[in-house]
Image (spheres, grey):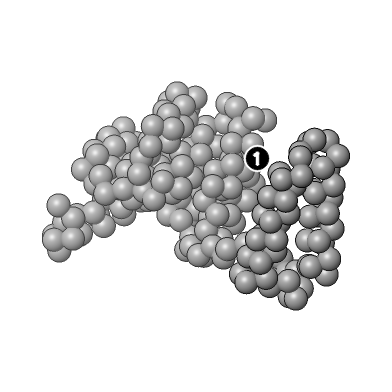
């Protein structure tokens, strides 16, 4: 079947050039020689006898649950509109599709542009897509979240978490301690921040973090 298609296409090309190209006899001889060379190359390198087979897309490496996904419910909530979109983005993250994870949240923001939780999620997704790098677009997403909800600890906390994932532990610690300095002693999310500060102190004591 492969040879039949190649021959039919060659005849059509030859006939079209002869009819509309107005080539002389010598030019047509060169054209014929070129087509014969193409046939020879196809016969040598190609596999005309094999059936066509679609090539599957490359497999993405599956990723573990992100730190954001593990703790966002305790800080941002689990049953609102943003949580549903962020859960979908989490599923893309676990499949290793970090680009579409960010794309899902971007789509949600077109419908809910003033939702701070979605902006936090976008910042986190962009950091993950950049392999832990705090890119300017991720920075802007966290800033947007903080501007919409200046009194909510979520944007600052997750901004610090993203910085820590990128190795900027001193900056993350400063942000977290700043949150605790003004947080009520009995607020539900306070242990979440205290735990990460304790883990950071332990890592420094063991020489794992400087």
In the image, taking residue 155 as reference, residue 176 lies left or right, namely left
Q: Nearer the viewer, residue 15 or 209?
A: 15
Residue occupying the point 83% across, 70% down: 1
Q: Residue placed farthest to the bottom in the image?
A: 49
In the image, taking residue 138 as reference, residue 22 lies left or right, namely right
Residue 202, position as x, y percentages in the image: 20, 59
Residue occupying the point 59% across, 56% down: 91
Q: Which residue is mark 1?
A: 81
Q: Secondary structure at mark 1?
A: helix
Q: Residue placed farthest to the front in the image?
A: 25
Answer few, some or many: residues within 10 Å of disc 1's Cα (few below 14, many 20 plus, some between 14 and 19): some
In the image, taking residue 177 as reference, residue 68 lies left or right, namely right
Residue occupying the point 18% across, 60% down: 208
Q: Is residue 194 visible?
A: no
Total numbered badges shown on the rendered structure: 1
Residue 163, position as x, y percentages in the image: 32, 43
Q: Nearer the viewer, residue 118 or 95?
A: 95
Identify whether 159 is placed above or below 143.
Answer: below
Q: Nearer the viewer, residue 5 or 142?
A: 5
Identify whether 52 is placed above or below 208.
Answer: below
Q: Is residue 123 visible?
A: yes
Q: Nearer the viewer, residue 96 or 80?
A: 96
Residue 182, position as x, y percentages in the image: 31, 32
Residue 104, picture quadrant: top right
In the image, taking residue 110 as reference, residue 72 lies left or right, namely left
Residue occupying the point 73% across, 54% down: 32
Identify whether 209 is placed above or below 155.
Answer: below
Residue 171, position as x, y percentages in the image: 24, 39
């Amino acid at each position: 079947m492969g040879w039949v298609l190649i021959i039919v296409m060659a005849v059509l090309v030859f006939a079209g050039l002869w009819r509309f190209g107005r080539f002389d006899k010598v030019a047509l001889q060169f054209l014929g020689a070129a087509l014969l060379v193409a046939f020879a190359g196809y016969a040598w390198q190609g596999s005309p006898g094999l059936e066509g087979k679609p090539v599957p897309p490359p497999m993405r490496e599956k990723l573990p649950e992100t730190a954001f996904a593990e703790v966002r419910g305790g800080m941002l909530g689990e049953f609102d509109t943003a949580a549903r979109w962020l859960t979908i983005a989490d599923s893309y993250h676990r499949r290793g599709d970090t680009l579409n994870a960010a794309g899902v949240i971007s789509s949600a923001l077109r419908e809910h542009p003033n939702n701070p939780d979605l902006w936090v999620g976008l910042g986190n997704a962009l950091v993950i897509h950049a392999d832990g790098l705090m890119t300017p677009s991720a920075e802007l997403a966290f800033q947007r979240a903080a501007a919409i909800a200046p009194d909510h600890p979520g944007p600052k906390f997750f901004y610090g978490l993203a910085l820590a994932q990128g190795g900027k532990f001193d900056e993350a610690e400063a942000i977290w301690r700043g949150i605790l300095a003004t947080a009520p002693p009995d607020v539900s999310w306070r242990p979440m921040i205290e735990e990460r500060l304790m883990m950071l102190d332990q890592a420094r004591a063991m020489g794992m973090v400087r």
